[in-house]
Amino acid sequence: MGTQTLRLPRSIALWVGTMFLFSLAAGTGSAEEQKKEHGGTPTAAYSPSLTTLGQIKVTIPGRKPDDPVISPEEFQKATQIYFQRCAGCHGVLRKGATGKPLTTDITRERGYKHLHTFITYGSPAGMPNWGTSGDLSKDDVDLMVRYLLIEPPQPPEFGMADIRKSWKVAVPVDKRPTKKMNTLDLDNLFSVTLRDAGQIALIDGESKKIVTVIDTGYAVHISRISASGRYLFVIGRDAKVNMIDLWMKTPATVAEVKIGAEARSVETSKMKGWEDKFAIAGAYWPPQYVIMDGATLEPQKVVSTRGMTYDTQEYHPEPRVAAIVASHYRPEFIVNVKETGKILLVDYSDIKNLKVTTIEAERFLHDGGFDSTKRYFLTAANARGKVVVVDTKKGTLTSILETGGETPHPGRGANLKHPVHGPVWATSHLGDETVALIGTDPKGHPDKAWKVVQTLEALGGGSLFVKSHPKSNNLYVDAVLNPEAEISASVAVFKVSELNKDEPEFVTLPIGEWAKISGGGQPRVVQGEYNTAGDEVWFSVWNAKDKESAIVIVDDKTLKLKHVIKDKRLITPTGKFNVFNTRADVY
Amino acid sequence: MGTQTLRLPRSIALWVGTMFLFSLAAGTGSAEEQKKEHGGTPTAAYSPSLTTLGQIKVTIPGRKPDDPVISPEEFQKATQIYFQRCAGCHGVLRKGATGKPLTTDITRERGYKHLHTFITYGSPAGMPNWGTSGDLSKDDVDLMVRYLLIEPPQPPEFGMADIRKSWKVAVPVDKRPTKKMNTLDLDNLFSVTLRDAGQIALIDGESKKIVTVIDTGYAVHISRISASGRYLFVIGRDAKVNMIDLWMKTPATVAEVKIGAEARSVETSKMKGWEDKFAIAGAYWPPQYVIMDGATLEPQKVVSTRGMTYDTQEYHPEPRVAAIVASHYRPEFIVNVKETGKILLVDYSDIKNLKVTTIEAERFLHDGGFDSTKRYFLTAANARGKVVVVDTKKGTLTSILETGGETPHPGRGANLKHPVHGPVWATSHLGDETVALIGTDPKGHPDKAWKVVQTLEALGGGSLFVKSHPKSNNLYVDAVLNPEAEISASVAVFKVSELNKDEPEFVTLPIGEWAKISGGGQPRVVQGEYNTAGDEVWFSVWNAKDKESAIVIVDDKTLKLKHVIKDKRLITPTGKFNVFNTRADVY
């Protein structure tokens, strides 16, 4: 019992930590550089044992004690940047997920120069070019490298007291309209994330005009619609949930709440008899999900996801909540717990006596969606290159399969009627050009079910989203992560009816070019979204915050440009969510 | 984000912790004494802020740096003693439960002298007199006081890899007998904890002879019997589970496993169709339960209990697993999670897709047992003075009621047929002389159900266990915690048929006196246990490790001494578990 880490009082630990920053962090070079520069053993310098530390008294050979290489103010700033820009992929505790782990054993091994280059220029595998994109200044990059070479801070908990403190009902239920007070076609409204503005835009699907812009959390990750179609829920990466009443003359936030420090997912109850009754949001930090009242966002239940990895059954301190979907067959939310690889079926029919079924799935669960019948939930275990299938009617694991590609990233995926293989569900990959088509019809095509029946090759360099629609013959595949500007601003389109060919060809749509962006920048084209009729597809042309962005609308039949939405308020548009398609899980 | 505690690398933290021990821990006096002695502000000395530490450079005014007031070796020894003697009540992280919290804000406020007195002499409320009992030497007491004035170490995790490493199958299933190879009446066998010897004794109920003594974990907390009656499971406070095959010529351990660092509970599956299929054990540290194969103890599933308190919904890092019982109505284990106040219904019918219902109950859940129908589980939320009732047939919370006494401690409780109130379940209290009788017959006596229908006054000073039997007219109440030697060695007996009186009287049995212990000591009399026929009751006369102990057997009809078991091997006997009564939940 005497060899484990000792708990220090908060103030001591902070102080020691700061000392440590001032002294040890002074060595910002790689292990090799350290060795050269100081002649000492870098391992001993960075991870001093009792003995070596007893000798060197918390200073690095060749460095003055208390050399302020990273000041408390810089540390504060770097933590802020890390939580906003990096934690989403690399984890609050830097243990990695979509992005690589950045624990100090690894960062110190890589060294200052390597990290600096990586942060500045990014990588084809998905790391953004923070430096050359202008998102981070040269000083910021330098700061972040130094920050990554020291131990991460432990972020605070965010329990019910904090959540309740953040909870605001702007318009109580009895002050809300009793019928729709506007003339909007709500089903064909689009909720568009204005990423770096901390807002969403509601855009009318018919007129293509912005109806209103609403302040939200930072970098809204998704929009979800209540089963009735009345309420829109959005969640920012800062874990702020906004609930927007679409019946108001001008739709606006009626309630908001912050459910943690960092989050990605929100959903509402969809089972018959439970429409609009509950909302749920999942946090990256603290690792927890929160069940809220569906009319007010009043937080009702906070459930921690800390626990054992599904396979080695070791304790994981930060199993983040990724995608959440609502079952159409049972009063359940389906909650992906990323690092431990567990899929939770959270029964909301009695939240005082909460029943949760924990399905052993696969690590690094991320996003996913339903098959065309909405019975099966297909979700990526992205860093494991797998897709996990859950039968939401039975509440059991159906299958785990390899996609054959690198890091599947389906979003909600795309459902197609394949000319040979019947109903399939598609996912593209972050790490390569492939699109995997997976059979989803165990009754009609039992030999194809839960197998990759075909692999398409699209533009390459890494895609974020695929998109199709039950009424469409097209499959769209973006190429956001491609290092070439032209390709990352284009979209590949496959004809579904021609997928019987050996090597199906695709048409490339130069969406970015069509947008005719003025004022420069390097906009990326991301996330196709259909209108309600299924006859047009909207793409975000996502430029830097201070540059012009646009939404380009493609005629789905002709694949010609139909319309370009430009508006000064359209700052960094990314995700778009058509109200009907989102509500009814049509994709 | 910049003000929270920083994570240090293990080695740094250890080193800093040790520095901290050497210097800060030097002040072993109370806050007031500190002030007097050094003239400084004791708060600053103990919890130095960044600034003050910056000034004083990790030394206490008036103390030499590195003054080894607690050495690493002493720290190691104190940790060992703390984990063995104190953690069970005060918590691994010292946050308190049955015992008071011992975090440094409290211990430093109380000060050296107060703690020394408390540890030496104990308290009537339940703190043992470790000093005067001889369990701890004067030096040990001094060491423990100093230990409590510094921050506790964080004990390590104990996941599947550690658990599997500890797993041993001494006799594989195919090498075990296929029929009973001895002539023992297994149903009337008693498994007796030999607390400080780290053993159990199997004692034949008929001959009263020790059949065998088996090495186990330290201070076996309970024994449980598989549904078939063949296998005996015991768990030590050190979280070691032994599985003993009662069919062997001489019953012996056939498998063992360690499921954590500290534990209290073990149980086996009892639902029809699942007999002998699974075992489960619950740990105090790490906070987790482990489901094992019922034939080999092979660990199958580790589940963390870390999570939110049921009421304030704040994260708790150490929600310990207290009592576990096996439902007779559903394939479920019922798991008490102490600090968060949650009762888990763990469905073992599909442990790959584990279904757990979490009932919001009350904090500090401890021990409990079934009503006479075995449908309702009654369990104490001890520090809250309450009993929680769960309907194990429906899987829902039935009631939460106050017992009216201080710190109910039912063990499994005692079921009586009350002459006025019908079926009741009894619990005594750690903190006073009362016994609460709670109505358990919602059909026959709906107005009495889940209410305290009568409160008896027994010997006083604090009781650990009550005991009765369906065939008996007696209710036995021990008084283990009474500070008077004579009373703590006696047992009160109420006649069930006379409970219709206003103030029912009891007979006092001088069990300790009957044992005629030679060689001194101050034995306590604890935990009555019936034989299978229900016509005799066994009590432990629990003396110090180096003193003579005994088991005294009372004739239940006459309340006269029937037999005294003495044996050199009978070292510190405490809990006794009759095979049939334990297996069939008869109490």
Image: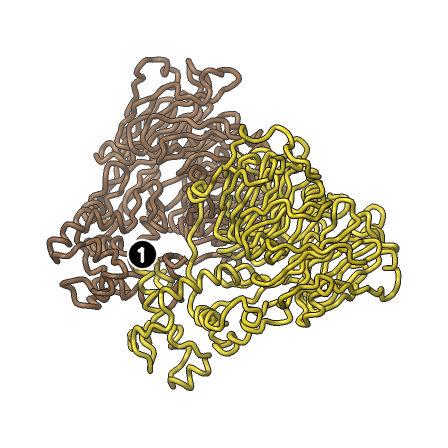
Chain colours: A brown, B yellow
Whether residue B453 is situated above or below residue B281 in the rendered picture: below
**Residue at the spot 35% in from the left edge and 38% down from the top edge:** A565
For the C terminus of chain A, the quadrant is top left
**Residue at the spot 36% in from the left edge and 33% down from the top edge:** A384
**Residue at the spot 85% in from the left edge and 51% down from the top edge:** B422
Tell me if residue A517 can be seen: yes
| Drawn side of residue A188 relative to residue A57, left or right | right
Q: Where is residue B447 in the image (x, y as percent from the top left)?
A: 83, 53
Name the residue carrying label 1: B9
Q: Of residues B61 and B222, which is closer to you in this image?
A: B222
Q: Position of residue A401 (x, y in %)?
A: 41, 26
Q: Circle 1 sits in a helix, a strand or a loop, which is it?
A: loop
Q: Residues within 10 Å of mark 1 (few under 14, many from 20)?
A: some
Tell me if residue A553 can be seen: no
Whether residue B568 is situated above or below residue A179 in the rendered picture: below
| Drawn side of residue B380 relative to residue A328, left or right | right
Q: Mark 1 lies on which chain?
A: B
**Residue at the spot 59% in from the left edge and 57% down from the top edge:** B571
Q: Where is residue B565 in the image (x, y as percent from the top left)?
A: 69, 54
Q: Where is residue A555 in the image (x, y as percent from the top left)?
A: 37, 27
For the N terminus of chain A, the quadrant is bottom left
Amino acid at circle 1: Pro
Image quadrant assignment for residue B474 = bottom right
Q: Of residues A326 and A361, which is closer to you in this image?
A: A361
Whether residue B61 is situated above or below residue B432 in the rendered picture: below
Q: Of residues B426 and A283, which is closer to you in this image?
A: B426
How many numbered badges does the structure rendering display? 1
Whether residue A518 is situated above or below residue B519 in the rendered picture: above
